[in-house]
Image: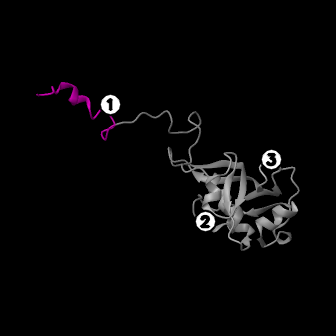
Amino acid sequence: MDTLCRLMPSELPETIDPMRLAKIGKALSGSYDLHQLARVNALLEADPGGQVSFRLKFSRDDESRLFCVVVELEAMLPMVCQRCLQPMQRQVGGIVNMAIVSNEAEAESLPAQFEPYIESGVSVKLQDFVEDELLLVMPLVALHGEKTCPAADKPIENKSGRERIAKVNPFAELKNLKLRK
């Protein structure tokens, strides 16, 4: 995505009408500073300091005859590894193919390759649209890779720290019970 032409936030429209943009085949690309995205910021470790780069391509799919939005996102997010509780940088991004629909019934009948975007008939803030999609591609639990996590090779120990805790099967005693008739 680094090769994409990026517009400065001041050059981007504040609001968009996805259906209108799909009808004219418009594309938008740019970036927002992560500190501008309050809902994303609430999930991050420390001051994010980075950016989310995006590209939105609005069009009509010739095969399905649907109005579509292809969303491409890329960001480096400061998060906390939930295994070792150490700060980490997590690359997130992806491509989402959305079809613009007007109600839930249309959303349920979409081909599998499309995610529904239910159009409300009002313009949406571009920044909120991008933030919504970034929230959807963020991991629920941030973890270092198993081989790179400082806590990955540490054994689980009991409170005294002397021996490993054996895994206990809560149903192990059931094998000793006999069924009575």
Q: Secondary structure at mark 2?
A: helix
Residue ID at (58%, 33%)? 147
Mark 2 lies on residue: 39
| The magenta stretch spans residue 164 | yes
The x and y percentages for residue 161 are 34, 37
Mark 3 lies on residue: 63
- Find the magenta span and give its range: 158-181
Mark 1 lies on residue: 166
Dot 1 or dot 3, earlier in sequence: 3
In the depicted view, which residue is nearer to us: 65 or 98?
A: 65
Residue 49 location, quadrant:
bottom right
Which residue type does callout 1 highlight?
Ala
Quarter holding the C terminus is top left
Which residue type does callout 3 highlight?
Glu
Q: Secondary structure at mark 1?
A: loop
The x and y percentages for residue 140 are 55, 51
Dot 3 or dot 2, earlier in sequence: 2
Tell me the distance, in whole angstroms, between the alpha carbons under discs 3 and 2.
Answer: 36 Å
**Is residue 174 shown above or below 144?**
above
